[in-house]
């Protein structure tokens, strides 16, 4: 999850956001153990590289490469090689060049981080005891779990604590036996909308879920179906990252679902949706002056965003940050592809030819992001690209909480169930389970969209 340095002391409980007094060891509202709040990580200066890859003429469907010529696997498809186009088919204008940084004064200490870079992967506490419902159930286990609900008021209808499995949960959400607060609604979220589905989980190490998603289906003016998925990852060291991801996902989803039926080209609609999400996150930074006086070390809410629009013959992706989109064909003998390029330190090192991909992602600075949504963003560069797959498949839209455990397109294709296009909700649960089995060090969010978009009314089998 995208990260900036955290403060040495906290003024609010990381679990319930209640104000804390100096010297508190436990939250007086929810009992959260404040000793497990991660310490402020050490930042290292990093280099901002603004190299641009020359764009080819036209847009071709990505072809997998077998080797780099030296016996090592070739790098995954770089989306920068496929420039975005506007609704008229002309290439989108390149982003303005960032202003040059002023020279450092002689003898001045280096900055904690270069402009436009946020650092990822802070020290995390040990595994949290309260877990969201396990999404790794098989289809048979899911069917067995579908039992009729007991009548209201009966003993069996009372909610049982997920920690001790014995105590009754009171109306305030606490166990009357062991006192544990129960998982919050956002700890595990699932949604199915027609033929697409998304699942988000807190993971095994974070105290809350700072991811969010938005999925939906609509129709183009000619009646052709269109599916939309937006996935956002909160910058966990920023203020209110969960609010940022939720605001961005809702704004982008609403923008797309409103623009596509009006006839806006899907790629232009995606570009506009990213701008709408940016405005929504920026608005969260507006606060009374007294709030800044009471908490002067707070920073602006921030998140990353990735999204996809699928129609009967077109696949459009858009992103800012390091969340990704993968293409997994139904015929697994056909090579899969990654359709986005990270806004990250590692990606810039690879693009500049300073490191190969394995070296860059092994570096501790790999997940320092160079693009995000937020009032303190260095500059906003919405990326969009369009593709025309020549065969059916499934589109995987996910945060780094998943792709950290299936980084290459081939690894992701191996993790995606064969029936993911027909059973997207089950497929999304399996992928979240894959991340949890791998360690679950981050929040995990994934959305699956079958390609081509099925007719309206079609859903999971």
Image (cartoon, rainbow, N blue to C red):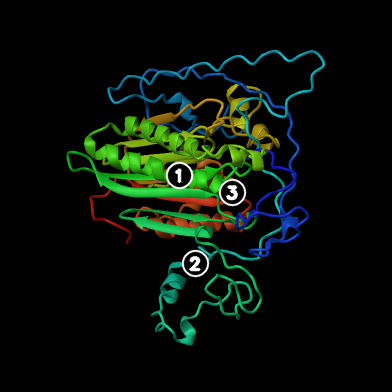
Q: Residue at x 53, y 65 (%)?
A: 134
- Mark toward the start of the polypeptide (2 vs 3): 2
Q: Is residue 425 above or below residue 356?
A: below
Q: Residue at x 21, y 43 (%)?
A: 224
In x, y percent, where is residue 425? 40, 58
The answer to whether residue 295 shows anywhere in this view is no
- Give the CA distance from mark 1 to mark 2: 30 Å
Helix, strand or loop for disc 1? helix
- Mark toward the start of the polypeptide (1 vs 2): 2
Q: Which mark is residue 190?
A: none
Q: Residue at x 66, y 76 (%)?
A: 178
In x, y percent, where is residue 206? 63, 54
Q: Are marks 3 and 1 in contact (CB under 8 Å)?
A: no
- Mark toward the start of the polypeptide (3 vs 1): 1
The answer to which of 75 and 290 lies nearer the viewer is 290
Q: Which mark is residue 137?
A: 2
Quarter occupied by the C terminus: bottom left
Q: Are marks 2 and 3 in contact (CB under 8 Å)?
A: no
Residue matched to label 1: 247
How crowded pointer 1 is (Cα within 10 Å; few <14, some 14-19, many 20+) is rated as: many
Residue matched to label 3: 405
Give the residue at the far bottom of this rendering: 154
Q: Residue at x 73, y 34 (%)?
A: 43
């Amino acid at each position: 999850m995208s990260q900036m340095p955290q403060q040495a002391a906290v003024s609010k409980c990381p679990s319930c956001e209640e104000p804390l007094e100096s010297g508190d060891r436990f939250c007086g509202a929810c009992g959260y153990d404040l000793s497990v709040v991660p310490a402020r990580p050490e930042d290292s200066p990093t280099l901002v590289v603004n190299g641009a890859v020359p764009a080819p003429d036209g847009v071709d469907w990505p072809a997998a490469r077998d080797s780099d010529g030296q016996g090592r696997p070739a790098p995954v498809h770089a989306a920068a090689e496929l420039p975005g186009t506007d609704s008229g088919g002309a290439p989108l204008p390149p982003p303005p060049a960032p202003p040059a940084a002023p020279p450092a004064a002689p003898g001045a200490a280096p900055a904690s981080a270069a402009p436009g870079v946020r650092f990822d992967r802070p020290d995390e506490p040990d595994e949290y005891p309260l877990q969201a419902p396990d999404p790794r159930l098989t289809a048979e286990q899911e069917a067995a779990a579908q039992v009729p609900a007991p009548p209201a008021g009966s003993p069996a209808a009372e909610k049982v604590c997920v920690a001790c499995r014995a105590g009754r949960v009171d109306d305030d959400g606490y166990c009357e036996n062991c006192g544990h607060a129960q998982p919050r609604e956002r700890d595990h979220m699932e949604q199915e909308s027609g033929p697409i589905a998304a699942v988000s989980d807190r993971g095994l190490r974070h105290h809350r879920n700072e991811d969010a998603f938005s999925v939906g289906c609509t129709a183009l003016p000619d009646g052709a179906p269109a599916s939309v998925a937006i996935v956002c990852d909160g910058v966990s060291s920023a203020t209110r990252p969960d609010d940022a991801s939720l605001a961005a996902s809702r704004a982008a989803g609403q923008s797309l679902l409103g623009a596509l039926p009006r006839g806006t080209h899907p790629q232009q609609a995606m570009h506009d949706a990213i701008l709408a999400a940016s405005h929504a996150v920026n608005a969260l930074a507006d606060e009374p002056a007294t709030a800044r006086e009471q908490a002067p070390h707070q920073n602006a809410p921030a998140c990353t965003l990735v999204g996809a629009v699928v129609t009967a013959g077109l696949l459009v992706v858009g992103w800012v940050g390091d969340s990704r989109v993968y293409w997994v064909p139904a015929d697994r003998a056909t090579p899969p592809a990654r359709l986005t390029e990270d806004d990250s330190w590692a990606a810039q090192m690879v693009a500049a030819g300073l490191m190969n991909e394995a070296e860059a992602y092994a570096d501790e600075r790999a997940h320092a992001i160079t693009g995000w949504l937020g009032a303190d963003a260095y500059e906003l560069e919405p990326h969009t690209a369009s593709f025309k797959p020549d065969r059916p498949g499934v589109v995987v839209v996910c945060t780094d909480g998943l792709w950290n455990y299936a980084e290459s397109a081939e690894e992701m294709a191996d993790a995606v169930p064969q029936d993911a296009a027909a059973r997207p909700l089950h497929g999304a649960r399996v992928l979240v389970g894959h991340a949890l089995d791998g360690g679950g060090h981050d929040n995990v969010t994934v959305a699956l969209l079958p390609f081509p978009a099925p007719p309206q009314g079609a859903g999971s089998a």
